[in-house]
Amino acid sequence: MMHYSEQEWMKYVKNELDKDVREEYEDHLYSCDQCLEVYLMAVEVEEAELPVISNEVDFTNLVMAQIAETKKDKPQKQKIGKKKKSIYQSAFFHYSIAAAVTILLMTTGVFQSITQYAENVQNPNLQEQRTSLTEGLVDKTFAWMDSLEGKKKEVDK
């Protein structure tokens, strides 16, 4: 496995590398503990070089004041009443369309044909006609008796 040097990790920490190279370094960090340690040391070195904030409260107040000034500089939209919605965005329009389509389908008979189709599919007349158990036994008994009579006639001949 190839390892990167401390100078290369310093370039990474200082953001001096191209995007593709940075992604290679990041992928390498997932699999190499040795380079991860070198990277963490490079971060500590870079952190030590950062300036120290002497008064954090004043710094925070200064930043918040600058944010407030930028908000004042931006023109705010005046809300004058409620903005009207388009007729196509109103619930009444959608309910009206649904009611009109329902009435159209009812008058053309689409729902009627759907119910007739469902009845035809579920119609017991289309299903196989089954005989009752007793009728089947009687038919088999008569068939067996007929075959016995046929054998008896053949023996008599």
Image (cartoon, rainbow, N blue to C red):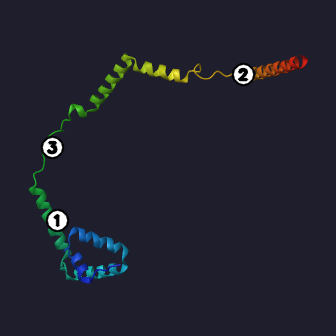
Disc tally is: 3
The alpha-carbon separation of the residues under discs 3 and 2 comes to 80 Å
* Residue 64's disc number: 1
Residue drawn at x 32%, y 73% is: 28
Residue drawn at x 35%, y 78% is: 1
Q: Secondary structure at mark 2?
A: loop
Whichever of callouts 1 and 2 sits on the residue coming sooner in the sequence is 1
60 with respect to 145 (left or right): left
At label 3, which amino acid type do we have? Lys
Q: Position of residue 154 (x, y in %)?
A: 86, 19
The alpha-carbon separation of the residues under discs 1 and 2 comes to 91 Å
- Of 15 and 154, nearer the camera is 154
Q: Position of residue 25 (x, y in %)?
A: 28, 73
Q: Nearer the viewer, mark 1 or mark 2?
A: 2
* Residue 132's disc number: 2
Residue occupied by mark 3: 79
Whichever of callouts 3 and 1 sits on the residue coming sooner in the sequence is 1
At label 1, which amino acid type do we have? Met
